[in-house]
Image (spheres, helix red, strand yellow):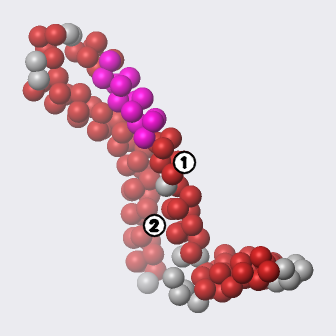
């Protein structure tokens, strides 16, 4: 079991590392292929092509990242929370110390489902 946990952590490190470097690798690959296999050589020099394309690529990624952050990220966090029974139990224990309102009881019921892993 210890080996499997270590392997999962190294795989997580690999994914985080690639997300940092993958953009540069992908952009470089795209620039070389696009410049060599299109007629861009006839239109402009490589440094100008790289500058213009990199700016366009960067702006596109910023726009996509902004939309992702606004639309999808909260869903991803909710799903991650629903797979964390220990954190759900901690929140439930804290909430049960508060006055028992309808809203509190509904949230405690939700946290109990997470603890039971019934999602």
Residue that protrudes farthest toward the front in the picture = 102
- Using the image as rendered, state which of residue 14 and residue 82 is in the foreground: 82
Instruction: Write the residue at 57% across / 66% down.
Output: 78
Q: On the picture, is 84 further left or further right than 4?
A: right
The image's mark for residue 9 is: 2
Residue 21, position as x, y percentages in the image: 38, 41
Q: Which residue is mark 1?
A: 70
Q: Secondary structure at mark 1?
A: helix
Foreground label between 2 and 1: 1
Q: Position of residue 99 (x, y in %)?
A: 89, 80
Q: Which mark sits nearer the N-terminus, 2 or 1?
A: 2
Q: Which residues are magenta?
A: 52-64
What is the CA distance from the residue labelled 2 to the residue labelled 1? 28 Å
In the rendered image, residue 67, in percent from the top left (x then y), is placed at: 48, 44
Residue extending furthest toward the right: 99
35, above or below 25, in the image:
above
Is residue 92 shown left or right of residue 57? right
Query: Would you place residue 46 above or below residue 66 in this image?
Result: above
Q: Residue furthest bottom?
A: 116
Q: Position of residue 118 (x, y in %)?
A: 53, 87
56 is within the stretch colored magenta: yes
The N terminus, quarter of image: bottom left
Residue 2 position (above or below residue 79) = below
Q: Residue at x 59, y 70 (%)?
A: 81
């Amino acid at each position: 079991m210890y080996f499997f946990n270590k392997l999962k952590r190294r795989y997580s490190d690999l994914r985080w590392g690639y997300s940092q470097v993958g953009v540069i690798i992908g952009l470089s690959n795209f620039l070389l292929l696009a410049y060599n296999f299109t007629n861009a050589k006839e239109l402009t020099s490589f440094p100008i092509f790289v500058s213009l394309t990199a700016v366009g690529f960067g702006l596109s990624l910023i726009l996509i990242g902004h939309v992702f952050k606004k639309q999808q990220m909260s869903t991803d966090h909710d799903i991650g929370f629903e797979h964390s029974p220990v954190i759900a139990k901690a929140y439930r224990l804290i909430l049960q110390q508060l006055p028992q309102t309808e809203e509190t009881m509904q949230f405690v019921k939700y946290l109990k489902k997470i603890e039971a892993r019934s999602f």
